[in-house]
Image (cartoon, rainbow, N blue to C red):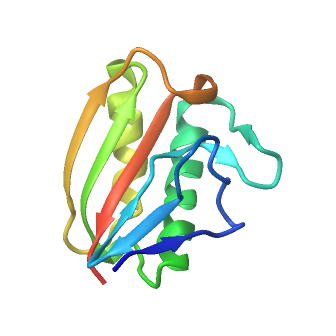
Amino acid sequence: MKTIISTPKAPGAIGPYSQAVAAGAVYTSGQLGIDPATGKLAEGVAAQTRQAMQNLSEVLKAAGADLDCVVKTTVFVKDLADFKTVNEIYGAYFTGSFPARSCVQVAALPMGGLVEIEAVAIK
């Protein structure tokens, strides 16, 4: 059984997908640094990373989970030169043990984003 997760506290899907799906675990879609109030990307990689993590947190909350429940993330960056900045901000959002993670550079992200983060969480 799967449950579709949706919250207005994170940006709505910009394509044919759900913000998250719960099916034993919670699988989130990638979260960009979009401010849900304006629908626009935050300025710069640091601000986009913070907003992406906030959006991820809100989607998890809507699923009855939180960042402490996350077991795996994938971080997509437009430029690996931003890795240090993204890594420092990302790390501040987790307490205790960190989830497993992959980080990859991609040619482009939707809306011209600089970072996108997805997660798998166990409630």
Question: Can you name the residue that lies furthest to the right here?
Answer: 38
Residue in the picture at 21% in, 63% down: 98
Quadrant in which the C terminus is drawn: bottom left
22 shown above or below 88: below
Residue in the picture at 46% in, 85% down: 64
Residue 59 or 84: which is nearer the viewer?
A: 59
Residue 43 or 119: which is nearer the viewer?
A: 119
Residue in the picture at 72% in, 66% down: 8
Quadrant in which the N terminus is drawn: bottom left
Question: Can you name the residue that lies furthest to the front here?
Answer: 1
23 shown above or below 31: below
113 shown above or below 13: above
In x, y percent, where is residue 69? Answer: 30, 77
In x, y percent, where is residue 19? Answer: 53, 59
Q: Quadrant of residue 100?
A: bottom left
Q: Quadrant of residue 113?
A: top right
In x, y percent, where is residue 37? Answer: 81, 55
Residue 42 or 28: which is nearer the viewer?
A: 28
Residue in the picture at 42% in, 67% down: 21
In x, y percent, where is residue 54? Answer: 56, 60
Count up the numbered dots. Answer: 0
89 shown above or below 64: above
